[in-house]
Every structure is written in C-alpha cells, then in structure tokens.
Amino acid sequence: MITAIVLVKTEVARIAEVAEAIVGLEGVSEVYSITGDSDLVAMVRVRRHEELAEVIPGRLNKVPGVVHTETHIAFQAYSQHDLETTFSLGLPDAD
C-alpha cells in the first residue's frame, strides 16, 4: 500500500464543500481540516504508484475550490493504533 499525504489549499468559503468532495474520491481514505498554511490534509492510499497520478492530479486537483496541493509520499507508517492492536492479548487494562 502506498500512502500519500496531500496538503490542500482551498478557496476560504468552500473548505467544507471541498473536503466533502475530496473524501468522496476513490483512493482518498480521510480528509482533515487543519490549521497553518494549508486548509485540508487528505490521506491517499493506493496499491500502485501509478494510481497516485490518477487520484491526485487526475481527480483531487480538479475538485472545484482547490487552489493548490502539495504531496508527500510516506516511506513507512508508524501508528500507535496499529501497535496496540498488534501487541494486544485481548485482556482488559489493569487500572
């Protein structure tokens, strides 16, 4: 699985509308509204590198209201959720 993190700048009045459109695209697993220079971050997950071109410049960049994108490709994923699942024995927490 290839994961791309896409920072998205939008027209200010259309942030929610753009987020809803992007999350509906095949290959996009989630979209977050964020602070900083970008308005949204979209997580794109595909099986083949070539599919990134179909999803990001092919569809995501063409969503009305998208002004600019910046894409980062993940080399390796580290997730606390995944680690907890991997090492869980199904026992209740000892509090």
Image (spheres, rainbow, N blue to C red):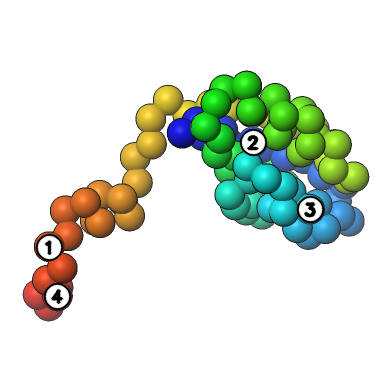
State the SS at label 2: strand
Kind of residue at disc 3: Ala
From the image, tell me which residue sits under label 3. 21
Q: Residue at x 55, y 26 (%)?
A: 48
Residue extending farthest to the top is: 50
Residue 11 horizontal side relative to residue 6, left or right: right
Q: Are marks 4 and 2 in contact (CB under 8 Å)?
A: no
From the image, tell me which residue sits under label 1. 89
Alpha carbon separation for disc pair 2 and 3: 14 Å
State the SS at label 3: helix
From the image, tell me which residue sits under label 2. 6
Q: Which mark is residue 92?
A: 4
Kind of residue at disc 1: Leu
Q: Residue at x 86, y 55 (%)?
A: 14
Q: Are marks 1 and 3 in contact (CB under 8 Å)?
A: no
Q: Residue at x 85, y 36 (%)?
A: 62
The answer to whether residue 87 is visible is: yes
Position in image of residue 43 (x %, y %): 58, 43
Q: Residue at x 15, y 68 (%)?
A: 90
Q: Are marks 2 and 3 in contact (CB under 8 Å)?
A: no
Position in image of residue 5 (x %, y %): 58, 36
Kind of residue at disc 4: Pro
Position in image of residue 18 (x %, y %): 80, 52
Q: Are marks 2 and 1 in contact (CB under 8 Å)?
A: no
Which one is in front in this view, the residue at disc 1 or the one at disc 4? 1
Q: Is residue 93 above or below residue 37?
A: below
Choose between 78 and 13: the one closer to the eye. Answer: 78
